[in-house]
């Protein structure tokens, strides 16, 4: 009498390779999980890097605005120079950052100054409006663009 080792009386035979199929399925699930986690980590690293760049640009725009307000006390009664490149620390220059003050549509009693911080294809700007009064140029309003 031949004995079937795959089944016992009253039960159906177990399929061959069941354990192999289960382990292959589990390996596939773990692989997909690892790929998903690594993609999420890459996206989070890129987001953090862009946040760092945006924060640096905002800080440069703020500094440029403060510098423009300080310089406005020495501006002549007629409109000052049209564009000024601000020198930055060597580390920022190496990373490609620039800071520029640009006067748009000046008149004898009002001028609009744009502070622009740039790096690669990212730009942050702020517009400052100055009024010329008896005490010199005074900041009237500031708008972040």
Image (tube, rainbow, N blue to C red):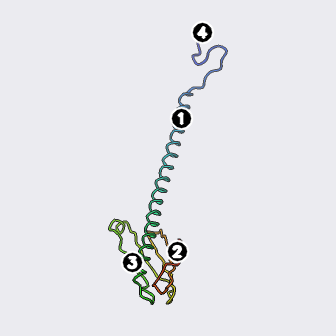
- Where does residue 81 sit, x and y in percent of width and height? 41, 85
Q: Are marks 1 and 4 in contact (CB under 8 Å)?
A: no
**Residue 92 horizontal side relative to residue 128, left or right:** left
User: Which residue lies at the image location 50% right of the left edge and 45% below the top edge?
Assistant: 37
The residue indicated by pointer 2 is 142
The residue indicated by pointer 4 is 1
- Where does residue 28 sit, x and y in percent of width and height? 53, 39
Q: CA distance from mark 1 to mark 4?
A: 39 Å
Looking at the image, is mark 1 or mark 2 earlier in the sequence? 1
- Where does residue 41 sit, x and y in percent of width and height? 48, 49
**Which of the numbered marks, if any, corresponds to residue 26?**
1
Q: CA distance from mark 3 to mark 1?
A: 60 Å
Looking at the image, is mark 1 or mark 4 earlier in the sequence? 4
Q: CA distance from mark 2 to mark 3?
A: 20 Å
Looking at the image, is mark 2 or mark 4 earlier in the sequence? 4
Q: Are marks 2 and 3 in contact (CB under 8 Å)?
A: no
**Residue 28 horizontal side relative to residue 7, left or right:** left
Q: CA distance from mark 2 to mark 4?
A: 98 Å
The residue nearer to you, when weighing 36 against 121, is 121
The residue indicated by pointer 3 is 85
Q: Nearer the viewer, mark 3 or mark 4?
A: 3
Secondary structure beneath label 2: strand
Q: Are marks 2 and 4 in contact (CB under 8 Å)?
A: no
Q: Nearer the viewer, mark 1 or mark 2?
A: 2
């Amino acid at each position: 009498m031949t004995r079937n080792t795959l089944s016992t009386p009253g039960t159906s035979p177990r399929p061959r390779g069941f354990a192999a199929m289960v382990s292959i399925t589990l390996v596939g699930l773990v692989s997909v999980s690892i790929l998903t986690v690594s993609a999420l980590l890459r996206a989070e690293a890129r987001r953090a890097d862009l946040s760092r760049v945006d924060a640096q640009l905002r800080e440069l725009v703020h500094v440029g605005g403060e510098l423009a307000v300080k310089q406005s006390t020495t501006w002549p009664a007629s409109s000052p120079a049209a564009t000024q490149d601000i020198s930055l620390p060597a580390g920022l220059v190496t990373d490609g950052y620039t800071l520029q003050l640009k006067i748009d549509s000046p008149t004898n009693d009002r001028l609009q100054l744009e502070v622009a911080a740039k790096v690669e294809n990212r730009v942050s700007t702020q517009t400052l409006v100055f009024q010329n009064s008896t005490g010199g140029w005074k900041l009237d309003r500031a708008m972040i663009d």
